[in-house]
Image (cartoon, rainbow, N blue to C red):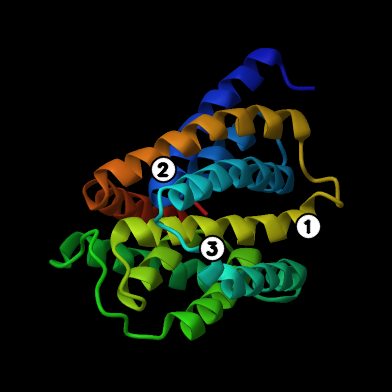
Amino acid sequence: MLDPMILLALVGVGMLAGFVDAVAGGGGMIGIPALLFVGLPPVSALATNKLQGVVGTAMAAVTFWRRGFVSLRALLPAIALTFAGSLIGALVVKRVDVSLLEVAVPVALIGIALYFLFAPNLSDSDRTARLPFALAVPAIGFALGFYDGIFGPGTGSFFTICFVTLLGLGITRASGHTKVLNFTSNLAALVIFIPAGDVVWPAAIAMACGQLVGGYAGARAGIRFGAKLIRPLVVVISISIAVKLLFFP
């Protein structure tokens, strides 16, 4: 049983993680270490983080959608395939060697950070898409959903870079679409974690309360400040995840 003061502290952690996740992704970098610090075993920390993160991501996704930055109808096929990909990834993770990803993913994240840092034309304005939305987004959703189920770090950054570079979305719209599909992939993982009893519910509920506030505030901040806020945060989060994976596995 977790101490009430620890649960109160986790509310604050959830709020901060929800804000960061809503703007640029990477809230798990805050949530998982905090859960490990209070004594949860690794699998329970991962499962509990997924549950509390789903709440904040859902709040952020709804906020972007209500402000007109996301078309759920256009995303329906991608939502279905992202869920399927994540579920398959979670089911096969124990049978696949993911050691190569421990090096490849940080390199890719550093590449994303450099792109967002130096690309001169990144803004909130949409550009010409390089691939057809209706065909490309479901395929991207399945691939990144599978990745999230089998490994996970940086999924939000990968979704965002795909929406910006391949689908031509402005950064704020790309962030909104990312939240919807990231919510979907996390939800699929919970289909595995919850029946297995891996979620520590008091911690998950405490952090979820913070996530409601942080996810809403982060989404509103992302909408208000757009590329000026999202772009540097994506750079910081991508590099932070890469450093963590390379030097603190």
Residue at point 69%, 14% (across, down) = 4
Q: Amino acid at mark 2?
A: Ala
Marks 2 and 3 sit apart, C-alpha to C-alpha, by 17 Å
Describe the element under mark 3 as helix, strand or loop: helix
Report the front residue among 126 and 179: 126
In front: mark 2 or mark 3?
A: 3
Q: Residue at x 77, y 69 (%)?
A: 91
| 194 is higher (above) or lower (below) than 37 | below
Q: Nearer the viewer, residue 174 or 191?
A: 174
Counting residues from the start of the chain, the first of labels 1 and 2 encountered is: 1
Mark 1 lies on residue: 191
- What amino acid type should be assigned to the residue bearing mark 1? Val
Q: Residue at x 30, y 59 (%)?
A: 171
Q: Residue furthest left?
A: 120
Residue 161: x %, y % from top left: 36, 68
Circle 3 residue: 72
Mark 1: give few (<14), some (14-19) or many (20+) Cα within 10 Å.
few
Label 3: few (<14), some (14–19) or many (≥20) C-alpha neighbours in 10 Å: few
* Residue ID at (79%, 58%): 192
Say which residue label 2 marks. Answer: 219
